[in-house]
Image (spheres, rainbow, N blue to C red):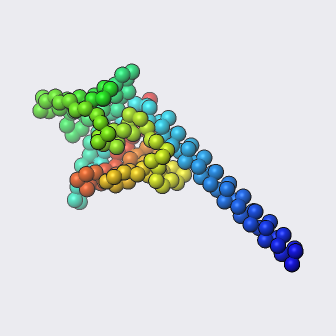
Amino acid sequence: MVQEKFLFRKETNLKTKFLFLFIISSNIQSNDLVQDFNNLIVNNFEFIQKTELNSSITESKGKIIRMENEIQIEITEPSKELYRIIENKIEIYDYDFNQNSTYHIDENNDRILDFIINGVNKADIKDLTDTTFSIKSDDSDIIIELKEDHSFSLTYIDNMQLKNIINFQVIK
């Protein structure tokens, strides 16, 4: 009887230790993956955005260039546009229609824009695997997948209920 109690305690302690190690390793994994993403996002990128519209897919291409005091997002295909993010505003240049506009950035702006500027906050992570994590969002979750070749992808459903996949590749 005494030996059974001892074995039960030993087994319970072992299970507790494994659970504790699992929680720690899961937290380390999430910290590493998010930190890897936040280290990667500060680079310049080329990107391809694919949007599923009914049974067809539209594609946009461009670049994200970081400068000392601004971020430029240049759309090169299918139309030519430039977005300049400077402090708390976005300047938009539509070259096809020869139009300019300016918007102020506030807490209601798009979450994707926030990732580009600030990276990901660990508190926003919802699900996590070895290479992907999802971010809590009001509309739909945003899935971020890190790839081994200094690239990543974002997958999300936009406010018009269209599926978007954006693949980012570091410009070397």
Seen at 45% across and 47% down, the residue is 124
- At x 33%, y 52%, the residue is 138
On the image, the x and y values in percent for residue 76 come to 25, 34
Q: Is residue 141 left or right of residue 11?
A: left
For image coordinates 50% across by 53% down, the residue present is 128
Q: How many marks?
A: 0
Closer-to-camera residue (126/67): 126
Q: Residue 158: x, y in percent?
A: 28, 51
Res 150 seen here: no
Q: Residue 39: x, y in percent?
A: 50, 35
Q: Nearer the viewer, residue 45 or 21?
A: 21
**Screen quadrant of the N terminus:** bottom right
Left or right: 151 as drawn, with respect to 165: right
Query: Above or below — where is 146 with respect to 95?
Result: below
Residue extending farthest to the left is 97
| Left or right side of 77 for 71 | right
Query: Can residue 65 be seen in this snapshot?
Result: yes
